[in-house]
Image (spheres, helix red, strand yellow):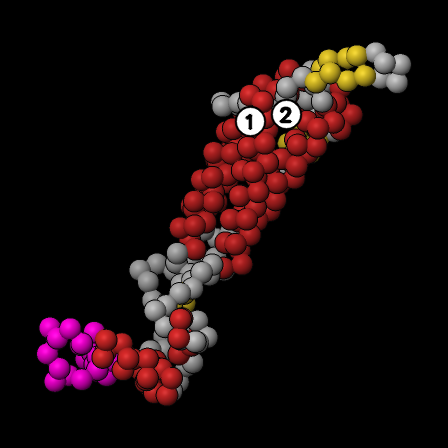
Amino acid sequence: MSGINTLFSGFGGNSSMNSFSPFASLTSSLSDYNMIRSGAYKKLMTSYFAKMTGDGKNTVQDPYSYTRRTNSVSKDSAATIGEIKESADELQDSASKLVKTGTQSLFNKVTTKDKDGKETTGYDTDKIYKAVKDFVKDYNNVLEAADESNTSSIRRATISMINSTNVYKSALSDVGITIGSDNQLSIDESKFKSADMSKVKSLFNGSGSFAYNVKSQANMIEFRADTEASKTNTYTSRGYYGNAYSSGSMWDSYF
């Protein structure tokens, strides 16, 4: 602890200044800023972190590549977490389009005319198929992204989504959607479009539907990934404190 105290004692400005002075905080901040601009900050950090290698050897390591020590460290890379978050977010979006009710529902019946002018009222199967196809693609992307994760909470959340989907296996098969041995979904366009659209609607539209359930599960996966993202914090190449998805410091406005 004495080494840490010695290191940071130089960051506090004039030690003789009364700590209750209204100018103490400003003087301290300007002193810190001048040390960074002059390069003294880097020298201090290099000297200090030379003593911080994991094997206890006095080997200098780059202070700007130093990973912030936290109570727990993510088992996944920032890239892996980013892919999981993005795919889970996209799955929530595609599920939301199917779940919507009222005037925005994809399952509202429409009236069309054929070339002879004959009117027909029914579901827009082409539009519904496209939306479900996007949903299937996004679902599979989440499985692929989560498969790269070494984090137990993310994997558990993904398994929960898989198990929930298996509950609907028979109903999905009736409308041309099958679950493979790898747990990924596949959709048969011809069988889907010829299926009873009222069954499709019950699977994908409204709260309590299969799509609504998957949306909730995807939200949990994204939440778990967010939790892991908070463990990937590092010091950036310019000495600022940031993390895998955002960075910020009181010094950013000076550079």
**Taking 64 as reference, is 150 above or below it?**
above
Query: Circle 2: is it few (<14), some (14-19), or many (20+) Cα within 10 Å?
Result: many
- The image quadrant where one finds the C terminus is bottom left
Q: In which quarter of the view is residue 124 placed?
A: top right
**Taking 65 as reference, is 199 above or below it?**
above
Please tell me whether mark 1 sits on a helix, a strand or a loop: loop
Dominant secondary-structure state across the stretch colored magenta = loop
**How far across and how far down the image is residue 111, in percent?**
73, 16
What amino acid type is highlighted by mark number 2? Leu
User: Disc 2 marks which residue?
Assistant: 106
Decide which of 133, 158 is in the foreground and name it: 133
**How far across and how far down the image is residue 52, in percent?**
33, 78
Q: In which quarter of the view is residue 205 placed?
A: top right
Which residue is situated farthest in the front direction here?
Answer: 22
Please name the residue shown 83% across and 11% down the image. 118
Question: Left or right: where does residue 60 sit relative to residue 7?
Answer: right
Look at the image and say whether residue 8 sits in the magenta stretch: yes
Q: Earlier in the sequence, mark 2 or mark 1?
A: 1
Look at the image and say whether residue 117 sits in the magenta stretch: no
Decide which of 66, 56 is in the foreground and name it: 66
User: Disc 1 marks which residue?
Assistant: 100
**How far across and how far down the image is residue 102, in percent?**
55, 21
- The image quadrant where one finds the N terminus is bottom left
Please tell me whether mark 2 sits on a helix, a strand or a loop: loop
Please name the residue shown 57% across and 42% down the image. 90
| Residue 121, visible in the rendered structure | yes
| Residue 55, visible in the rendered structure | no
Label 2 close to label 1 by CB (< 8 Å): yes
Residue range highlighted in magenta: 1-25
